[in-house]
Image (tube, helix red, strand yellow):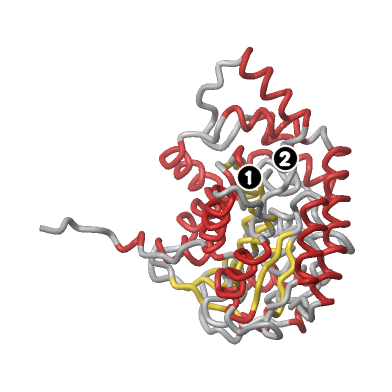
Amino acid sequence: MALKQAQRGNVSSFLVMDVMRAAAEIEATGKGVLHLEVGQPGFQAPKGARLAAARALEEDTLGYTDAVGRPALRARIAEQYSEAYAVDVTPERISVTTGSSAGFLLAFLACFEAGDRVALADPSYPCYRNILKALDIETVPIPVGPETRYQPTPEHLEALGEIDGVVVASPSNPTGAMFAPGELGRLARWCHSKGVRLISDEIYHGLTYEQTAETAANSSSAIVINSFSKYYAMTGWRIGWMVLPEDLIEPINKLAQNFFISPPAISQVAALASFDCREELEANKSIYARNRKVLLEALTDRGLQPAAPPDGAFYIYVDASPLSNDSLSLCKSMLDEIGVAATSGLDFQPINGNRYIRFSFCASESDVAEAARRIRTWRT
């Protein structure tokens, strides 16, 4: 007799994780792989953060904290909004989370009911879609394109009919594209006026190359989600935060208590110290900028044009159709033949992603330079 199994687990794989597994199998045979598939900084957590964590291991109990984070960390995050964006955010609006992934789960649970309609740019980060599906929330693709830097506009949303929410990211994953100046604010105002909950993924803030990222934290109804994983190079520490509107402070607090008890105490200690490591983090960013230039030149030399300008983050999303209209097979061939791992666009666009590939340039300079050389000389 078969036991009952919930349909919540019937979501798509996060394909980049499958690529990582295939790359690990190749590495297990003794062959090297250049990892351009995953958005994981090739740096350790900043030194000051590691030292603070080491001290805490020896001196602190490291038990449960407040469900929404230690007061000192929440206060420092709030202060960052004044420093970086000239936006006044109180510590009470900050909720520290177990990575941004917990933030998305909490936000979706607090804001939407089963059957609600939430709009996502096409392409966009696949976990938005998969978490929403597991919660029985309908996702509505937004057909964005290069004319708006692959970012949604109020005009896009007007054309979708009735929606309950929208998730945006600037810089985005997979394109690295950003809202044009003022456009995020225009979208936030439209959402507020229409009763549409805006969730702004800002985890790549700090990693921009030609313009400064804008935040939705000054909206009275938007949720901002951020993380220490990207700019702060703390992926495995699983620590992030949310900036909440006043009406969601208590619901998020209660959900966090029941789902997570508290974020990891050791990671909160390290995260607080990371704010004092700006020089090291900016040096990392300089390496990303050089990697971006090297990889972009190699890709365009092969006729692989970016779908959008990689304004920020550490991704280049290219149209691979000059080589193949089957990007999944093309990525497999690239991994097998030249040892370069990249991610099929099907992760980010289930319908049209067969034409696209995402390359990450957050590996070491030597790895990105070697990957660029191999891509240039690869004969498919």
**In this image, 303 relative to 10: left or right?**
right
Which of the labelled discs sits on residue 125, or is there none?
Answer: none
In this rendering, the answer to whether 230 lies above or below 377 is: above
Confirm or deny contact between disc 2 and disc 1 (CB under 8 A): yes
* Amino acid carrying mark 2 in the image: Ile
* Name of the residue lying farthest toward the top: 59
Q: Quadrant of residue 53?
A: top right
Residue at the (71%, 60%) spot, across then down: 360
| Residue 276: x %, y % from top left | 82, 32
| Residue 202: x %, y % from top left | 70, 56
Residue at the (82%, 45%) spot, across then down: 82
Q: Quadrant of the C terminus?
A: bottom right
Residue at the (63%, 53%) spot, across then down: 225
Give 101 or 30, whichever is nearer the viewer.
Answer: 30
Which of the labelled discs sits on residue 241, or is there none?
Answer: 1
In this rendering, the answer to whether 337 lies above or below 65 is: below
